Amino acid sequence: MWRSRTNRGGKTVVCIACGSSLSRADAREYDKAGNRWERHGKEFEHLCKGCYRDLCHHPRDELESLLGDIEEHGLSQEEFLRRYLAEVEARYGHLGEQEGHEEHEERER
């Protein structure tokens, strides 16, 4: 008899966002490359349903490379966030300027 696909071997996984343990069947797959449909040779991390719902599901092109560029072992959360914000501004400009520019363009239409 075929085994149920929803059981997935009864494996327990850990949510990478909140750290809770849950059954694999109750978890959502997270692929840091953003393409969970291309499955060959990948090992997925997992999120509980609540943390998955809280995720931003917008495209994240270049995010992993940006994080890799600023990552350093032993970096404090404060320093990591400072570096992240500085790198985002260096690459894409100040967020406030972009929002103001988009609002201005919208008014002109």
Image (cartoon, helix red, strand yellow):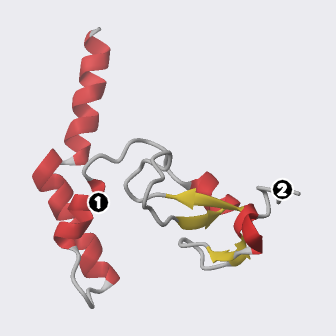
Residue 74 vs 39, above or below: the answer is: below
Percent coordinates x, y for residue 78 in the rendering: 30, 80
Residue designated by label 2: 2
Could you say whether the residue bearing mark 2 is in a helix, strand or loop? Answer: loop
List x then y, in percent, for residue 66.
Answer: 22, 60
* The N terminus, quarter of image: bottom right
> Which residue is located at x 58 percent, y 66 percent?
46
User: At 67% across and 78% down in the image, what residue appears?
Assistant: 20
Callout 1 amino acid: Glu
Give the number of the mark in front: 2 or 1: 2
State the residue position of label 1. Answer: 64
Dot label at residue 87: none
- At x 18%, y 48%, the residue is 94
10 Å crowding of disc 1: few (<14), some (14-19), many (20+): few
Q: Quadrant of the C terminus?
A: top left
First of labels 2, 1 by sequence position? 2
Residue furthest out toward the bottom: 74
